[in-house]
Image (cartoon, coloured by chain):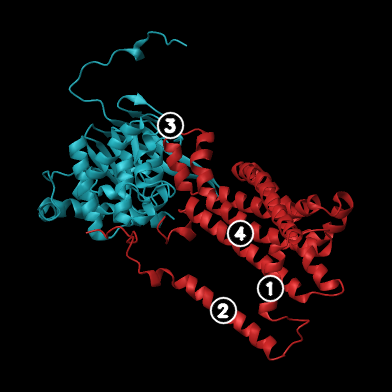
Amino acid sequence: MEAQAKAARPGRTPLLFAMRDPLLGLLGVGLLLLGWWAVTRGDLVASSSLPPPMDVARGVVHLVGDGGYRAEILDTVRAWVLAMVLGVAIAVPLGLVAGAVAAMRKPSLAVVHACRAVPLVALIPVAVLVLGLGTNMKVALTVSSISWLILLNTIYGVSSTEPQLLTVAKSLQWSKVTVLRRVVLPSALPMIATGIRVAGSVALIVILSVEIVAAGSGLGHLIIKFQADIPTHPDYAYAGIVITGVLGFIQYTGFMVLERRFVPWSHANRRQRP
Amino acid sequence: MHSQPTTDTKVAEPTTETVPMLRVDGLSKQYRSKHGKVQAIEQIDLAVHPGEFVSIVGPSGCGKTTLLNCLSGLIQPTTGELALDGRAYSSPPEELSIVFQDYSRSLFPWMSVEQNIAVPIRDSSSKAERRESVYRLLAQVGLPEKTGPMYPWQLSGGMQQRVAIARALVSRPKVLLMDEPFASVDAQTRNVLEDLVLNVWQEWNKTIIFVTHDIDEAVYLSDRIVVLSGSPASTIADLEVPISRPRDQLLSKQDPRFGEIRAELYELIMGAHKVDREAS
């Protein structure tokens, strides 16, 4: 007889087994902190270069607790959210059109690759001249560096629609618009989602870089201020870095959870039960 | 425009012959490729009667799938006419369903099994009707009810092909076209699915055109077997299978006529292979 359904058995995983991955993750972080503590404790490096973990932890608490500093952190978060919303709103519709219309695919791919080749740093001076040091400049630079990524993934997602499914749609005599809505879009979604998730990480990197190099506010601006302004505050500078890491972790995990929830059919998610 | 009341619009005279469920007249298909024109199919005539189970066999790469794509209205033949139940068609007719070879790629991975089966009727029925049809079909193709809300990729290959068969049946087609539907399932599953198709065929009184490269499968399932030559495909034989029904995986295959037809088919197909190779 045929093999039984391969679905995972729900509700039978022991707690310890279910917690294995998070626990192993915590163990890794714990070891890293321990190593960090040992290095500072043994005076292997100057505390002005690498303060002990407890000082940095206190710095984190202080930065998050202080209204002024929190505003700087939120400034970074706001720039990130704005850039992501704009990037998705611009790149996904463009990619859908460019990917779905065969005649537009090659020309648009050529344009995308050419534009993508321009390094972001080259744009910073121009952006500062045109948009100043505020959020607009950060968002503009970020959008211009992540849109290509989402655009490319959307184009590839659309153009890699399973031909057999298009044949099925043809045999049902669906109109072009119906095929786009019912076949092309859902089959491109996993790749679009991957593009957005990767763009989320890149966006954070770009925002931080711009803030460190040129902006008048934000988390990156704080980090460089604590490092450069006398008296220097290395513990706060490191605290800023830790907060950046946490933000990155939150956005990445958030996207993973959303993907698992909304595109359970993507190949990466198929091993889990939806 | 109104056609003139000339002789060709005369009312068909009542005859003892039934109208074929599927009629193919002088079908040929030519492709343009880098190496010039390629003749894939040459002059095929075929009449499949209502309720008949016809298999199409031929050497691999002989254009069986091209023929099926023409029959289903998915591609336009270069010459020739097609008619389903007496009505000419040139695009996929509603009364015809296709079961594709590659079940894993022909089911929508973002839809549940239930939604997949309901795809052909989603624009023409209420939610309640769809649910009812779907669950009746699940039972018909031997899938447990609990598979309804699952995704197709959570099922085994054989179960996925059952879903594909259910989907092909949901619109109550008159004709089923099956393109090597069991080519990628294991031997035991294949036998089980063959019997499932025979059951469906008898119970629902369908007309089935079944493309396969498996000679045993063709003999076991069919009333009639059409043998195609190598490229370009053309009909080289049309054999009746006089083995009694209902068929049985053990008994029918022990019937001496099973072996005879099998041998004849084998000779024909191997001969077609040979001609093909000498020609190229």
Dividing the picture into quadrants, the one containing residue B175 is top left
Residue with the mark numbered 1: A58
Q: Chain of mark 4?
A: A
Chain shaded cyan: B
| The label number, if any, that marks residue A30 in the structure image | 2
Give the CA separation, mark 3 to mark 2: 65 Å
Q: Chain of mark 3?
A: B
- Please say whether residue A214 is visible from this viewpoint: yes
Q: Nearer the viewer, residue A206 or B238?
A: A206
B98 relative to B189, above or below: above
Mark 2 residue type: Gly
Which class describes the residues within 10 Å of circle 4: few (<14), some (14-19), or many (20+)? some
- Which mark lies nearer to you, 4 or 2? 2
Which color is chain A depicted in?
red
Say yes or no: labels 3 and 4 on the same chain.
no
Q: Of the residues under marks 1 and 2, which one precedes in the sequence?
A: 2
- Which mark lies nearer to you, 4 or 1? 1
Residue with the mark numbered 3: B91
Give the CA separation, mark 1 to mark 3: 72 Å
- Residue drawn at x 58%, y 51% is A192
Q: Nearer the viewer, residue A159 or A196?
A: A196
Dividing the picture into quadrants, the one containing residue B94 is top left
Percent from the top left, x then y, of residue A251? 61, 59
Local SS, label 4: helix
Q: Nearer the viewer, residue A111 or B8?
A: A111
Residue with the mark numbered 4: A251
Which class describes the residues within 10 Å of circle 1: few (<14), some (14-19), or many (20+)? some
Percent from the top left, x then y, of residue A115? 76, 54
